Amino acid sequence: QTPKILAFAGSTRSASFNQQLVKAAAEAAKAAGAAVTYLDFLDYDMPLYNQDLEAKAGLPASVVQFKALLKEHQGFLIACPEYNGSLTPLLKNAIDWASRPEPGEPPMALSCFRHKVAALLSASPGQLGGMRGLIHVRAILEGIGVLVIPDQKSIPTAHSAFDAQGQLQDEAQRLAVHQVAQKLVEVTAKLNAA
Ligand code: FNR
């Protein structure tokens, strides 16, 4: 059956390089045969995680919605900026909220993450393209049961990498991003076959 991929960036900046990157990769995933949903965290107003808030009010509606989307998809395509050598608080906060159980779910069920597949991308104006942040994203996701494929791509000097349509100008970079997306679709399809 058609693998379902959820694509999102760890940035809500209006001109986000990582949003441009994940959208380009999402198109490649579609071309590789996946059904792709794009998620913008601007549409998911999540408070900063606070255990007292959770104890008092439960999971916010935005978190329940985000978790439902994660559950509906078998693969995640994620582009995350690097902030001070790590991932953005936006992405960490979303992951932390989603790792919490819904009413009736046992603690640490992690039902929206376990047995899912993810591929990671990053873009940065810097020379390393944000690759140091992805080390942490990988470790966090693997720790909650996501199979993060080894294929990943970081785009350095991102301020001059995209054209006006948000496409990567460099052919080799475009190909590398497409290959990451294709591999995600392939592995997701294989794991969900039968
Ligand atoms: C950054 N930036 C950055 N870049 C990088 O390559 N390594 C880093 O450690 C950091 N650290 C960092 C910290 C903070 C707090 C900010 C706000 C920014 C720059 C970052 O890559 C740049 O702002 C990107 O444009 C962010 O990605 P989006 O929003 O364009 O997707």
Image (cartoon, grey):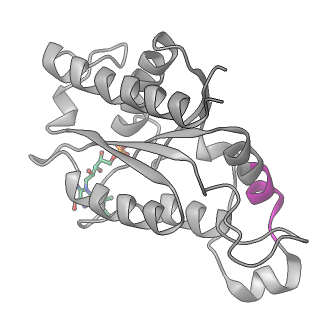
Question: Which residue shows up at 30% across the image and 55% down it?
Answer: 134
Q: In this view, does 49 lie above or below 110?
A: below
Q: In which quarter of the image is residue 142?
A: bottom left
Task: Please identify the residue farthest to the front as the structure is shown.
Answer: 194
Question: Which residue shows up at 53% across the image and 14% down it?
Answer: 33
Image location (x, y in percent) of residue 90: 51, 60
The image quadrant where one finds the N terminus is top right
Residue 105 relative to residue 169: left or right: right
The image quadrant where one finds the C terminus is top right
Q: Which of 3 and 165 is in front in this view?
A: 3
Task: Please identify the residue farthest to the bottom as the structure is shown.
Answer: 52
Q: Is residue 60 magenta?
A: yes
Question: Which residue shows up at 54% across the image and 37% down it?
Answer: 191
Image location (x, y in percent) of residue 164: 32, 14
Q: Is residue 30 above or below residue 17?
A: above
Q: Is residue 142 magenta?
A: no
Q: Quadrant of ligand 1?
A: bottom left
Which stretch appears magenta?
Answer: 59-65
Q: Nearer the viewer, residue 106 or 164?
A: 106
Q: In this view, does 55 lie above or below 49?
A: below
Residue 64 relative to residue 33: left or right: right
Image location (x, y in percent) of residue 3: 60, 26
Q: In which quarter of the image is residue 55?
A: bottom right
Question: Which residue shows up at 78% across the image and 80% down it?
Answer: 54
What type of secondary structure mainly makes up the magenta span?
helix
